[in-house]
Amino acid sequence: MKAVRFHEHGGPEVLRYENAPDPTPKPTEVRLRVKAVALNHLDVWLRKGLPGLKVPLPKIGGCDIAGEVAALGSACTRVKIGERIMVSPGWSCGQCAACLQGEDNFCRAYQIIGGYSLDGGCAELVCVPEVNCITIPERLDYPSAAAVPLIFLTAWNMLVRRAHLKDGEDVLVMGAGSGVGTAAIQIAKLFRSRVIAVAGTDDKLAKAAGLGADAGINYATQDLAQEVRRLTGKRGVDVVFEHVGGTTWEKLIPTLAPGGRLVTCGATAGYESKVDIRYFFSKSLAVLGAFMGCKADLLEVVRHMAEGRLRPVVDRTLPLSECARAHRLIEDRAVFGKIVLLPE
Ligand SMILES: [Zn+2]
């Protein structure tokens, strides 16, 4: 098969579109003919390499996979040859206390398909466990289906499960043009929230408004804290949806209303920030972390997708052979929503 692999860590130039061995399904796995694969920041980090994390090389990335079932392992019973499948990206043991409580993302064996150790979908073929196969709703084509799992799972976990978003609350969505931001805007609107989108260009803010955002703040030209105060009548927001990190936290913590929650799933702009601890006790604030989400939540997301209440946002599709270009676009933040690769 053709695949995009890297044999060493480095810039986008290490990504090679080349021949790779066809994967063979284990008894509990299915082999998919990949029709679309969406990229995430995780793909960029894996390619660059992270200190202390050893990635087996050569590596095939791509955690958001949609494809057609091409072959079944001998123990598969549920999915059928030819079925349209989107892949739940989280793999867990299925037998520990965390898994049995539905908190599969807390499983000590938890892995992401296309993550550090398991090969992903930047290829013509991929083998995934049958338990990770979700039937694609009729409403979605393959590129749209590939644009769903990671970001909607994460955003749902952050807002619904971690921050306990309540009807009508005010939500500030950082990085509103990113994949996870586009998911957060829509999920918050399901809960009839007032959404204030934050992005670095007016074009992204206009597109965020198209997804339902009620107001926008351009952090490049406007003062974030001042704008939040103005838009909320000095009250502040109930939830800050965060994945940018770095020094923005110094500005964000004071924008929270009493009882407010900041929930984060990433730190693309930096790992360290200074915060004034007094805000936490004087305003009863909470900071919540989130990593991926449980599979049951992804199934709930897919139900909303099937009914058209949530929709994936695909910025553009590119041929799989242009994977390196797609990585550059993500690193340049030149994408609104998801970038999806299509095997030829
Ligand atoms: Zn487990």
Image (cartoon, rainbow, N blue to C red):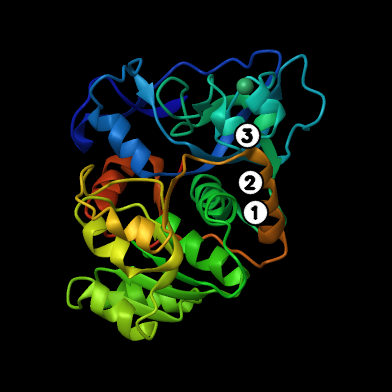
Among numbered discs 3 and 2, the one appearing first in the sequence: 3
Residue under numbered circle 1: 301
Which of discs 3 and 2 lies nearer the camera? The answer is 3
Residue under numbered circle 3: 103
Query: Is residue 275 or residue 273 the one in the foreground?
Result: 275
Query: Is residue 172 or residue 90 the one in the foreground?
Result: 172
Name the element at disc 2.
helix
Q: Quadrant of residue 17?
A: top left
Side of 171 relative to 267 (left or right):
right
The quarter of the rendering in which ligand 1 is drawn is top right
Q: Disc 3 marks which amino acid? A: Glu
**Residue 257 in the image, given as x and y percentages of width and height:** 41, 70
Asked if residue 30 can be seen in this view, the reply is: no
Residue under numbered circle 2: 298
The furthest residue to the front: 282
Q: Tag 2: Cα neighbours inside 10 Å, few (<14), some, or many (≥20)?
A: many
Which of discs 1 and 3 lies nearer the camera? The answer is 3
